[in-house]
Image (tube, helix red, strand yellow):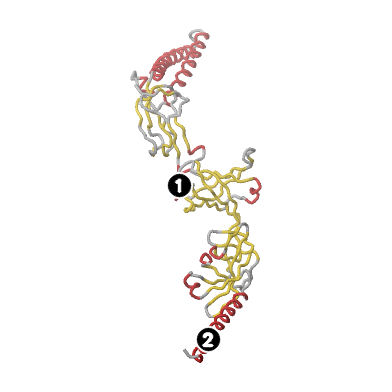
Amino acid sequence: MTNRIKYILYFTALAALVGACQSNQQEQNESSTLGADELEITAEHFEGGGMVIGHLESRSFRDEISCRGYLRAPANGMAEISTPIAGAVESVHFKLGDYVRRGQTVCTISGNDFLGLQQQYAEASALYSKAQADYERMKMLQDERIGAKKDYLSAESSYKTALAAYNTLKARIRVLNIDPEKIERGDVYMAFPVVTPISGYVTGSHIVVGQYVDPAYNIAEIVDVSQLQLQLSVFGQDIAQVKEGQEVRFTLGGRQDEILTATLASVGKSISPETKTIECIARLNDRDKEHLIHDTYVEAQIITGTKEAPALPATAVQKEGESYFVYVVVEEKGGDYIIARKQVKVGSISKEYFEILSGLDEDTPVLVRGIDTL
């Protein structure tokens, strides 16, 4: 190879090396112009990451108080059924989860106490009839001024005593939901029905056939779900903001994706010394009641007010520790963007939007979608 060719190859390689160094130096210079919190996004990255540029927008936010509670029926919407007199369970007419109507028989009871009560009533009825006849006869004689006054008074006393005993036993018989006149005719019931005092669903069953039960034993529990309400525990420091008529939004345990609503109906007047909370009651929407279950745990928010405020979508805000950041557009050139990370102060937070209190101007372009691809 001639010296001339060697020189040509040498200078060509040298020129290529110098060109590469200058190119690298130019890229380094361009990169060094970016600030510490700035980042360049190419057009391809922008489109591929589904990024969107937006601005602050006005959104409605709710001022709310968080609290917890339970779905419960009031006192007149629940019933614990027991027997008026002791005896053995002869038959059971329900199962757990059944809907029963007021006056419906849930079980029948038999036993010596029941038979003995019928006997007492039959005897009291007979004594009453005799005392009544004697009294009416003595009264007639007294009206005609025949007979001694003391005999009349004795007959009157016996009649009133017999009447009191008769009426008392008759009331006890009627409590058993049987016909007292049938017993007066000499008939005897072998068992009596226990009926439910309210309509509702059977939420508790505690008997089997043949079991001995007395008036202190809880045979079954009935809940009228149409009367279910929210019993909420609100902390004392928040109670000043709570008023009747405010909207309540709540979720059931295990069903956080379904938001139900209620209306605050009453605010308690005493604070629990143990929990430092005040009990409040909220009225449910009728359309929800039949699907709800008594004693379900709920998490709720009482809406105390609403406001309009500048906001960004939740997809535009990044949380780091206790601080919040957004990415603002510093410069756009040829479809490429230079963005900068900027700290902002947030206020109210909803599932979809963050209220921006400070740190961002109204006309500043912001990356509102796609920051998770950075």
**In terms of secondary structure, where does tag 1 sit?**
helix
Q: Nearer the viewer, residue 355 or 155?
A: 355
Residue depicted at 40% across the width and 31% down the height: 195
Residue 84 in the image: x percent, y percent? Answer: 44, 25
Residue 278 in the image: x percent, y percent? Answer: 61, 43
Residue 157 in the image: x percent, y percent? Answer: 51, 13
Query: In the rendered image, which residue does mark 1 sit on?
Result: 289
Q: Amino acid at mark 1?
A: Lys
Q: Nearer the viewer, residue 76 or 146?
A: 76
Q: Which mark is residue 111?
A: none
Residue depicted at 60% across the width and 66% down the height: 310
Q: Amino acid at mark 2?
A: Tyr
**In terms of secondary structure, where does tag 2 sit?**
helix
Counting other residues with Cα less than 10 Å from the Cα at mark 1, is it few (<14), some (14-19), or many (20 or more)? some
What separation in Å lies between label 1 and label 2 (alpha carbons)? 90 Å
Q: Quadrant of residue 348?
A: bottom right
Judge whether 35 appears above or below 240 on screen. below
Residue 340 in the image: x percent, y percent? Answer: 60, 70
- Residue depth check, mark 1 versus mark 2: number of the one nearer the observer: 2
Query: In the rendered image, which residue does mark 2 sit on?
Result: 10
Would residue 229 appear left or right of 195 to someone viewing this image? right
Counting other residues with Cα less than 10 Å from the Cα at mark 2, is it few (<14), some (14-19), or many (20 or more)? few
Residue depicted at 53% across the width and 48% down the height: 299
Mark earlier in primary sequence (1, 2): 2
Judge whether 85 appears above or below 368 on screen. above
